Image (spheres, rainbow, N blue to C red):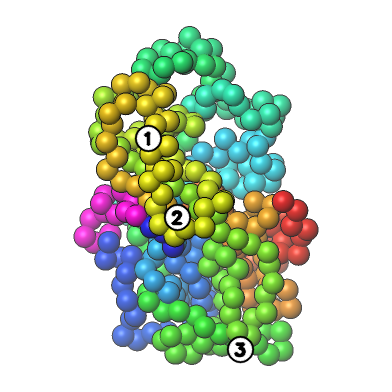
Amino acid sequence: MGSGRAIWVDQLSTGELSALDPGVPERLDRRPDVLVVGGGILGVATAVACRDAEVGSVLLIESRHLGSGATGGAAGLLVPEAHQGTDPDALANLARASFARWRDLEVTLAGGVGFADLDWLGLAPHPDGFLNHPSPAAEWLSAAEVAQLLPDLAQPVQGVRIRHQGRVNPLRALSRLAAQVPQIATGVTATAVKVRGGRVLAVSSSAGVIAPGTVVFATGLPPDLDGLGLQVPASLVKGHLVVTEPVPVVLPGSVAPVATQLEDGRLLAGGTLDADDPTTGVSAEVTDRIRAGLATAFPGLRHVRLTHRWCCWRPRHPDGLPVIDRIPGLGNAWITSGHYRTGILLGPATGSMLAQWIATGNRPANAAPWTIQREFSS
């Protein structure tokens, strides 16, 4: 779910747009070996990983079009090393593994996924966790060195640079990955499940009943379906992003917390956390504040025009960490939810983890921290 118009749509070809909303196939597979519910990056990456693991036929259903939720409104930054020290080691390690898979996909997938290599520059003050436990890839920069990299910056400060991180247009990456999924049905809403003997026997949907061998719920928030009875604390956190017209300022990649430069010289900025904003639309006050922040950092941008303003709602568990687990009491049902601000980054590794689990029946070692039964402290 999102509001406004993200720039990512404008960058897609007609074919890439079409791949995001194929509709319902004429011969919908009603008995797939694996049914994936949810068409964001987590769902599509999981469907691709299941296909690659050769676990049988795969069907993905999405209630709207692919990427209609948080995926389509994300910034698309792939910066695993920035999570070192600021998040649990398990998350940083999963992020690194997923980043490696993004790079592999760019090389092995026909046409790639639109991966762009970039450096990440974080300006002081730095989070205490990162300062105490920095990434081995961190290069510490003096204010003078930052000034050389950012001559238009109003007040140079110390910084840290991490080379060779990445970025994708999230909808382009999703479209390219979706082309690898055996069957996708958009505009299909799951409404209920039938459970018996510790297994999901059927999933009722707006397109009729589907009887899968295995089902993965990748719906952002935990699924609220009749017959499932799943109780996992989660909420949505609103956030805004903007894109400017092309600017004369040149950034050396992504500069946190200011902006990231896109291919045509535009700046992508924002990524706010508007937890107290109950409204459903784009807030002019918030986007104007982002624009003012750009002008404060770079005085030459005081008259910059915003061409795109949008917001989206990120699914979050109270501890800010994802759930990647088999649903308790069900032998053939899995869930991945609450990826919050890391969904794009963690998509490929999460999908691979679930596919491995489904194929072998054994919980992968790196799945242990993401259990649905953990204590969700905020």
Report the label total: 3
**Quadrant of the rendered structure where residue 258 is?**
top left
State the residue position of label 3.
194
Q: Which residue is mark 1?
A: 291
Q: Is residue 106 left or right of residue 354?
A: left
In the image, the segment drawn in magenta is 4-16
Residue at the image position 67 percent from the left and 34 percent from the top: 85
Q: Position of residue 222 (x, y in %)?
A: 60, 68
Q: Secondary structure at mark 2?
A: strand
Q: At 64% from the left edge and 78% from the top edge, which residue is drawn?
A: 332
Q: Quadrant of residue 220?
A: bottom right
Is residue 243 a member of the stretch shown in magenta?
no
In this rendering, the answer to whether 188 lies above or below 318 is below
- State the separation of the CA atoms marked 1 and 3: 50 Å
Q: Nearer the viewer, mark 1 or mark 3?
A: 1
Q: Which mark is residue 54?
A: none
Q: Is residue 154 left or right of residue 79?
A: left
Of callouts 3 and 2, the N-terminal one: 3
Which residue is located at x 26 percent, y 24 percent? Answer: 248
Q: Mark 2 — residue?
A: 312
Tell me the SS state at disc 3. Answer: strand
